[in-house]
Amino acid sequence: MNIHKLWSHLQKDRLERAFSLAQERSYDEAVILLESVLQAEPANSAALTQLAFCQLRRRQPRLALLELDKAESVDGVTARTARMRADALSSLHRYREARAAYREADALGDRTSWNLVQLARCCLRLNDLEGARGAAARAVERGPEDAAAWVVLGDVAARADDAAQAESAYLRATQLKPGDGYAYARLIECRLLQLEPQDRKREVELLLKSTGGDNPHLLQLLARLQSELGDAAAAAAAWRKSRRRVGRSGSAYALRMEGFALKRAGSLPEAAAVLRESLMMEPENVIALRGYVRLQQERGAVGELRETLQELLPIAGTRRGAIHGELRKLPSDGEH
């Protein structure tokens, strides 16, 4: 066997091993192997696509997008690359672009219900209720045993104020996946709508003391009910408890909501610290950015604000220009 064939076999073995590592969820090791393959073959589209997949699993959506650009420049857009691009864009809260990419994946032959579930979620984020309704209905048709499809169908019905359909969809989701805490909390919320807020709160508290004690979504429901009743401090406490029970992807949202609740409760320094933490986790979240800037301006904490904005700049992505703009509005260090 000549040197060329030996090298070719070595590259093939590395690529196969990288795929195996990805299946084992050893994404860091897979990335190292894939990068070694690409050093010798920069235009290896299989390696580029798999590297993008691993970067997504490592919660590195920007790096995934860079690899997808390279892969698509070699072999064009495929259903798989379009869906991965959509997943990356969605995780960066670029929902308009993600919606277009999920639609492209569907047009290119993606037949998973996941693609349609995510499309429906993006449509909801963009207040495109008709688009969300259509995607959710197709998701249920394509994956009738997929709990996520029924959950998003329930979310669409709830947004449309169709409580009966929402309850039916959430019930089906909990039957298909009994451990889905979000679907269960939404089902409870639908069933409590006929009660007054104080009675809803009491029912949720009873559930938390019995079967739902480990469900962060029930705690978040309690937090929203506390806010409805005007008890911002209690709402903040419930948001704080909920984020201890969710993974990193959900804790930024809970942090942000806790920060706003603390602000309403008058605990401004604590609110500023919590909102800052949520911003560091989601530096492109415009709601958190505006809320934090406004709060620090109200407090007169210009130094803290400047320091945070400067720290955000390297990781701000699409919000880099907005952060530059906020920095320019601040008085210089010597001004009083």
Image (cartoon, helix red, strand yellow):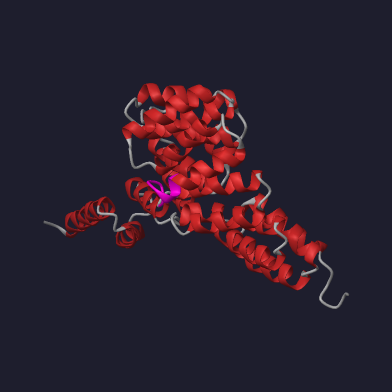
- Left of 288 or right of it: where is 27? left
**How many callouts does the rendering have?**
0
Among the 4 quarters of the image, the one containing residue 277: bottom right
> Hey, which residue is sitting farthest right in the picture?
336
Q: As rendered, which of 107 and 231 lies closer to the eye?
A: 231
Q: Residue at coordinates 62% horizontally, 32% vertically from top-left?
A: 127
Where residue 173 sits in the image (x, y, percent)? 38, 32
Q: Residue at coordinates 85% horizontally, 78% vertically from top-left?
A: 334
Q: Is 323 included in the stretch rendered in magenta?
A: no
Q: Is residue 284 visible?
A: no
Give the position of the C terminus as an image quadrant.
bottom right
> Hey, which residue is sitting farthest left in the picture?
1
Among the 4 quarters of the image, the one containing residue 228: top right
Where residue 233 sits in the image (x, y, percent)? 64, 57
Instruction: Check the image and report above or below for 100 versus 21.
Output: above
Where residue 168 sits in the image (x, y, percent)? 43, 25
Q: Is residue 149 visible?
A: yes
Among the 4 quarters of the image, the one containing residue 308: bottom right
Instruction: Check the image and report above or below for 276 versus 81.
Output: below
Q: Residue at coordinates 44% horizontally, 45% vertically from top-left?
A: 207
Instruction: Check the image and report above or below for 269 versus 177.
Output: below
- Left of 36 or right of it: where is 73? right
Give the position of the N terminus as an image quadrant.
bottom left
Which segment did they paint magenta?
Answer: 207-213
Where residue 101 sits in the image (x, y, percent)? 50, 35
Q: Residue at coordinates 14% horizontally, 57% vertically from top-left?
A: 2
